[in-house]
Amino acid sequence: MALIPIVLLLLDGIARQRGTIEWRGLRLSFAQAAEGATSGAVVPANATPGTELLDSGMHSLLRTARAASRNRIIVVDLTDGTSWWETRLLMVLSVASAQPGEHAIVFLAERGQRGHLFLGWAHADILRERLLDSRPHLRLAYEAAAKDAIRGAASLPLLPPNEPTTGPQAAIDEPRALGDPDARNLAQHIQRLEASTGAVPGRYPLTAATVIDWFYPVLVTETVERNATQELWVKAVLGTDARYIAVTDGQVYVGLLSRAQAVNSLLDGLLKR
């Protein structure tokens, strides 16, 4: 906190010279910022809520996940822990990870009588790998779907789950040969897993506790309140190298604010002094 005025003075000095600064991988041109300055503060209204997905059946979820992945932010509301299965989350993460660019997945949950509370966010591809590492049976289904995609492309017959391969098909079973599975193939394997009555339940519910347990090392949980003071906003903007800053209102999720936009808004305020 004590360093914030110093940082602002440094930025103000550079801004007055219309210079350029590179910091934490972000390159800022004060000359360009001066030309497009429109606001004097970080505006929480710029936070993007994202597209909320509902676990409403595999085929419906597949369609909506594809549509939602056109956006950069996807919201998964766990509610009271009965709304989502781990298998359906894998489906969403796989679809989002296969799209160009980075996609943020936001987790929300209920506590007591309050809903839509922010748990954290992370990039879809990182969450997918964490989920596959945490749940071996999901890894098996994912890799089986990837093998199906390779066999289909090579006009080779599909094999029943867990059946060993020999001859030319054996190379398909090498992990290094696997890519991302086709969404339809993955959906088929997930549905088979959900129908399983084996020792590992295919319909394992997602709760706030399981999300924290599996994903905590990669979740971005820091937030800034929508009505926070300017000093707290500056601290939030300059104190992270994450792509987004989570904005809340009494812990209730408002949206994700692009750090680049927040920094530009902060610099606009300095330039207009």
Image (spheres, rainbow, N blue to C red):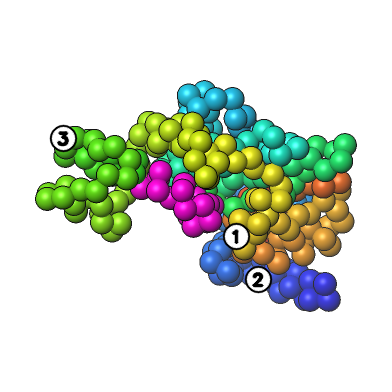
Name the amino acid, label 2.
Ile
Q: Nearer the viewer, mark 3 or mark 1?
A: 3
Magenta region: which residues?
A: 127-143
Q: Quadrant of the N terminus?
A: bottom right
Q: Quadrant of the C terminus?
A: bottom right
Residue located at (12% from left, 49% from top): 168
Residue located at (46% from left, 46% from top): 138
**Does any portion of residue 29 appear in the rendered image?**
yes
Q: Nearer the viewer, residue 24 or 242?
A: 242
Q: Tell me the SS state at disc 2.
A: helix
Q: Which residue is mark 3?
A: 155
**Does any portion of residue 153 appear in the rendered image?**
no
Q: Which residue is mark 1?
A: 218
The Cα–Cα distance between marks 2 and 3, rounded to whole angstroms, is 61 Å
The Cα–Cα distance between marks 3 and 1, rounded to whole angstroms, is 39 Å
- Residue 55 sits above or below residue 230 on the image: above
Q: Nearer the viewer, mark 2 or mark 1?
A: 1
Mark 3 or mark 1: name the one nearer the start of the chain: 3
Mark 2 or mark 3: name the one nearer the start of the chain: 2
Residue 54 is a magenta residue = no
Residue located at (39% from left, 31% from top): 188
Q: Nearer the viewer, residue 190 or 237?
A: 190
Secondary structure mostly seen in magenta is helix
Q: Are marks 3 and 1 in contact (CB under 8 Å)?
A: no
Name the amino acid, label 3.
Ser
Residue 141 is a magenta residue = yes
The Cα–Cα distance between marks 2 and 1, rounded to whole angstroms, is 34 Å
